[in-house]
Image (cartoon, rainbow, N blue to C red):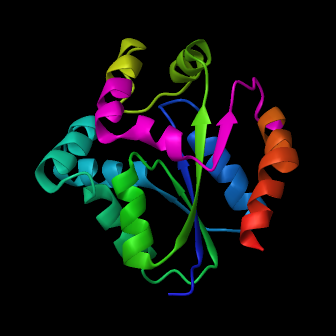
Amino acid sequence: MKTRLAILIAGLPCSGKTTVAKILSEKLKAPLFSMGDIIREEAARLGIDPGKVATMLRTREGRRAVAYRLVEKLRDVTAEIVIVEGVRGPDEIDVIKEMLNMDTVLIYVVASRPVRESRFRQRARQDDRTVSSVLVRDLRECLYGILDLLTIADIVLVNDFEEVSQLEKYIESDVLPRLRVRIG
């Protein structure tokens, strides 16, 4: 395993985690892995709602369940940097560090509630039915430990930008220079 750094992206639903991860992946030429994709793959396999799968896995197998599945995907990756979007708790970070012997940088993406609700209405995913389900998902993710990540984040990125181009400029001017210090 030659991968030496995992840039982990966390945040509540519709904060812009995926967009941040895609921008970083492109700028750093690093492969992108999504914890949410792991949940959605399992949901499709089982034929049930992704929210139920996330809870089921973590209830039956513990808070590290999704990270264990991610590790299987990362084992043969030879890139020096990988981006992992959708980390939900400190236990998942521990799995990545311990099982893959990787250094990590945690970026926590935050956005105001009105901005998150607006983004929620704009996207149409299977697990997004009503705006009130944002609150339900927030509560569920709090149980997974997502708020704990805010206290240990290396970078907190406030993403109330209206345009992706504004976010991209911010990442280029503020986040990438801070990451390059860690990358070397």
Q: Which region shows up in magenta?
A: 137-165
Q: Residue at x 68, y 31 (%)?
A: 158
Picture quadrant of residue 136? top left
Picture quadrant of residue 42? bottom left
Percent position of residue 154, x then y? 62, 50
Q: Residue at x 51, y 80 (%)?
A: 77
Q: Is residue 16 visible?
A: no
Percent position of residue 20, x then y? 66, 45
> On the picture, is 110 further left or further right than 135?
right
Above or below residue 141? Residue 26 is: below
Q: Residue at x 34, y 55 (%)?
A: 91
Tell whether position 93 is magenta: no
Q: Is residue 107 visible?
A: yes
Percent position of residue 37, x then y? 41, 52
> On the picture, is 99 further left or further right than 13?
left
Above or below residue 6? Residue 135 is: above
Above or below residue 49? Residue 106 is: below
> On the picture, is 58 further left or further right than 1?
left
> Which quarter of the rendering shows the C terminus?
bottom right
Tell whether position 162 is magenta: yes
Percent position of residue 176, x then y? 79, 55
